């Protein structure tokens, strides 16, 4: 019994770290803000108090383009916690539960990975526990993207278990409950699957039929086509290369949406031609490459979207057969986390300073702190610098893993 307990330290110690760290974050956040809300989209949490509000088009946010099943996933946490805690804590605890579910699924993946040492399993879970890509999205900002971490880890686990059918179905469900952009996961699945028709029948076809039906119903009931009509022209809050253009020139949301989708498609076609000729592909590596392409080519990439790659960035340095230095990916992970959330915070502070956002005590504290510590640096310069750091970090992660995948394939083939 003692030896069995000792062998599971790789799981229990990171779990304690995860829980203790989240509790500390929530306590500090509550005391610093006095429990006053500092985000502008409390409606994201309130959807969980009305589980069928999106599915029935009774809630109008982002041109009815919220994931229809998201409120149903949030409700089991939001409803009971709203009876125990105030809104500030109940919302953040609910989204922390999404993170915790993803933690457990990732742990299950590791438990099935005999090739990963116990120490490295602990490192993967520890990185997942403390990365700002996770706790900033869930515990701090309580954003819906936290639910996508569940589907990323679930798809990884399904592939690990050899169930392409399950992975396809999970990708389809991830589009309905998380983000429609999660459908890009079909790309790496198609690359590694021998029977590609399974992915089509269990994932792609249901996604097309359900989303088409939902779009038609939405148009008939509201006059708006969900997902298609949503195209904001002001995306300065997004961590995207297109945001750099917004500092100098404005553009039509619809135009840049279809332009960025076209660019994403072209790059994926190139990647397909390159990788379809390779016989040795590692799914986590191809998956993170695909996400990096999305982040670099699509225009509406919120800071919170980077939680998509958190399980992969935690896993790949310790669980890949590719020749990648652990320190290189971990350093880039840190740069990405600092860059993307630094950018998101500084943007919010600048918007507050320019009276473009509502008042909150935390924003005032952040602005005063910036002026006291970094006041000699123009805030807009800091904002742009952090955005560039984010994009460069993503690009380097893409390049490192892309060429490591090519080198690994060539090495195996040459044997």
Image: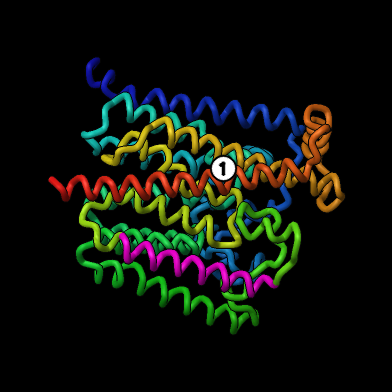
Q: Which residue lies at the image location 72% right of the left edge and 28% below the top edge?
A: 31
Q: Is residue 261 visible?
A: yes
- Counting from the top left corner in percent of width and height, residue 315 is at 37, 38
Q: Main secondary structure of the magenta part?
A: helix
Task: Tell whether 202 sits left or right of 70.
Answer: left
Q: Is residue 81 visible?
A: no
- Counting from the top left corner in percent of width and height, residue 98 is at 49, 44
- Name the residue tied to disc 1: 138
> For the magenta stretch, what is the residue range?
252-274
User: As rendered, which of 198 and 383 lies closer to the eye?
Assistant: 383
- Counting from the top left corner in percent of width and height, residue 278 is at 24, 57
Quadrant, the N terminus: top left
- Counting from the top left corner in percent of width and height, residue 167 is at 31, 57
User: As rendered, which of 235 and 155 lies closer to the eye?
Assistant: 235
Q: Which residue lies at the image location 53% right of the left edge and 48% below the top edge?
A: 306
What secondary structure is found at the residue carrying circle 1?
helix
Task: Tell whether 40 sits left or right of 23.
Answer: right
């Amino acid at each position: 019994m003692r030896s069995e307990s000792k062998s599971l330290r790789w799981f229990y110690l990171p779990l304690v770290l995860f829980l203790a760290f989240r509790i500390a974050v929530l306590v500090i956040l509550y005391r610093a803000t006095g429990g006053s809300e500092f985000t502008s989209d409390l409606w994201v949490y309130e959807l969980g108090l009305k589980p069928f509000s999106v599915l029935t088009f009774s809630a109008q946010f982002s041109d009815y383009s919220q994931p229809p099943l998201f409120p149903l996933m949030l409700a089991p946490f939001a409803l009971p916690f709203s009876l125990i805690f105030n809104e500030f804590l109940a919302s953040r605890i609910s989204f922390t539960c999404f993170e915790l579910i993803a933690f457990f699924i990732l742990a299950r993946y590791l438990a099935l990975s005999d090739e990963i040492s116990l120490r490295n399993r602990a490192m993967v879970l520890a990185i997942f526990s403390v990365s700002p890509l996770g706790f900033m999205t869930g515990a701090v900002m309580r954003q819906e993207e936290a639910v996508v971490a569940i589907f990323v880890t679930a798809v990884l686990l399904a592939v690990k278990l050899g169930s392409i059918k399950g992975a396809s179905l999970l990708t389809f469900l991830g589009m309905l409950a998380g983000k429609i952009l999660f459908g890009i996961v079909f790309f790496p699945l198609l690359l590694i699957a021998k029977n590609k028709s399974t992915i089509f029948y269990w994932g792609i076809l249901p996604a097309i039929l359900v989303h088409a039906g939902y779009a038609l119903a939405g148009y008939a009931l509201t006059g708006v086509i969900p997902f298609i009509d949503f195209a904001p022209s002001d995306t300065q809050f997004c961590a995207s290369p297109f945001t750099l253009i917004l500092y100098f020139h404005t553009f039509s949301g619809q135009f840049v949406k279809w332009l960025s989708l076209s660019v994403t498609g072209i790059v994926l076609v190139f990647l397909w031609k390159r990788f379809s000729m390779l016989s040795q592909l590692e799914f986590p590596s191809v998956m993170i490459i695909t996400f990096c392409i999305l982040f670099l080519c699509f225009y509406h990439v919120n800071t919170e979207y980077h939680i998509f790659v958190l399980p992969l960035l935690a896993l790949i340095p310790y669980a890949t057969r590719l020749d990648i230095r652990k320190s290189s990916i971990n350093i880039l992970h840190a740069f990405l986390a600092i860059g993307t959330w630094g950018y998101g915070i500084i943007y919010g502070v600048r918007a507050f300073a320019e009276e473009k956002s509502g008042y909150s005590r935390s924003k005032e504290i952040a602005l005063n702190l910036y002026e006291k510590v970094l006041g000699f640096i123009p805030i807009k310069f800091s904002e742009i610098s952090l955005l560039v750091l984010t994009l460069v970090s993503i690009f380097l992660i893409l390049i490192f893993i892309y060429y490591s995948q090519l080198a690994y394939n060539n090495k195996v083939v040459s044997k």
